[in-house]
């Protein structure tokens, strides 16, 4: 029923619209507000909303087809025209938006290597989105979402990803589905991250120096990874820093930079 409310007029986008949407009570815009505001609504429908020309341009470039696309009347942008003030009422941006679109969520069947990032208990959607952005920047093959992790398709996560949500494969993950050696990032525990390579522990063959598949496991800044996740890791490592901790996104970015360099073909 949720999907039907959004899609029943989608083919009308290909036909000329003589009048823009002018009502704040328009049923299609009501559905967009629900998708934007409620995780359960997104999970039930398998749909999410992206806003702004930059994000929609990335989606187009990555081959994502919008189920519905809306644009401010008079903007010249593609989509069903909506009066600007009415479109702003459906937007989550403080300044409003000139365009937004509804997409189907995409979930991979399982996390994939050779370099995977696993997030466990990272509840801040801004951190989740920023991790996606770093994962794309450093060539991660997938990002796996564990229990207690924010919805990567929430508006805040989508915006923070700067379009990476359209490029990096996402999967729901558990310890037994993670590819390769599992490296748990734990403050002040295990080896300094660069030392894993000096010890040869993360190579398939220490003589051939062939890099193996690996999953970088990241927990929340305050709580970290739970004991059972740490116990299931092949290696514990930390980022040598002068303070107590980094937030999840910063820690993931530094660690991904290190791993991507070390796992590159020499």
Image: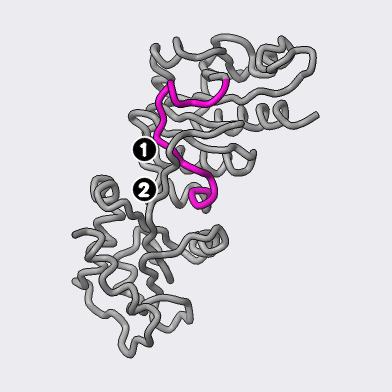
| Mark 1 element type | loop
Circle 2: is it few (<14), some (14-19), or many (20+) Cα within 10 Å? many
Q: Residue at x 61, y 20 (%)?
A: 239
Q: Which residues are magenta?
A: 164-180
Q: Position of residue 214 (x, y in %)?
A: 59, 24
Q: Secondary structure at mark 2?
A: loop
Q: Is 31 a magenta residue?
A: no
Q: Residue sitting at 52 percent across and 16 percent down?
A: 187
* Residue of label 2: 154
Q: Quadrant of residue 18?
A: bottom left
Residue at position x 63%, y 43% in the image? 137
- Front residue of this view, candidates 223 and 146: 146
Give above or below for 263 relative to 29: above
Numbered badge on residue 123 = none
Q: Is the residue 171 above or below the residue 242 in the image?
A: below
| Residue 189 percent across, percent down from the top left | 54, 10
| Quadrant placement of the N terminus | bottom left
Based on the picture, tell me whether residue 169 belongs to the magenta stretch. Answer: yes
Q: Which mark is residue 150?
A: 1
């Amino acid at each position: 029923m949720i999907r039907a409310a959004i899609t029943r007029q989608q083919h009308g986008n290909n036909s000329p619209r003589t009048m823009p949407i002018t009502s704040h009570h328009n049923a299609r815009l009501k559905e967009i507000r629900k998708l934007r505001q409620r995780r359960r609504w997104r999970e039930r429908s398998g749909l999410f909303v992206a806003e702004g020309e930059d994000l929609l341009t990335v989606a187009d470039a990555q081959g994502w087809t919008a189920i519905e696309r809306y644009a401010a009347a008079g903007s010249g942008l593609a989509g069903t025209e909506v009066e600007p003030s009415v479109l702003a009422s459906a937007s989550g941006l403080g300044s409003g938006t000139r365009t937004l679109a509804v997409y189907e969520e995409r979930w991979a069947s399982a996390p994939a290597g050779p370099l995977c990032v696993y997030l466990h208990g990272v509840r801040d959607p801004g951190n989740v989105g920023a991790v996606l952005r770093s994962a794309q920047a450093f060539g991660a093959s997938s990002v796996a979402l564990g229990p207690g992790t924010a919805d990567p398709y929430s508006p805040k996560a989508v915006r923070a990803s700067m379009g990476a949500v359209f490029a990096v494969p996402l999967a729901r993950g558990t310890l037994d589905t993670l590819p390769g050696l599992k490296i748990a990032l734990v403050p002040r525990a295990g080896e300094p991250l660069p030392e894993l390579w000096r010890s040869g522990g993360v190579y398939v063959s220490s003589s051939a120096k062939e890099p193996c598949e690996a999953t970088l496991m990241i927990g929340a800044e305050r709580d970290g990874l739970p004991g059972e996740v740490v116990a299931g890791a092949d290696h514990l490592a930390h980022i040598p820093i002068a303070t107590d901790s980094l937030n999840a996104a910063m820690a993931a970015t530094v660690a991904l930079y290190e791993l991507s360099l070390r796992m590159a073909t020499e």
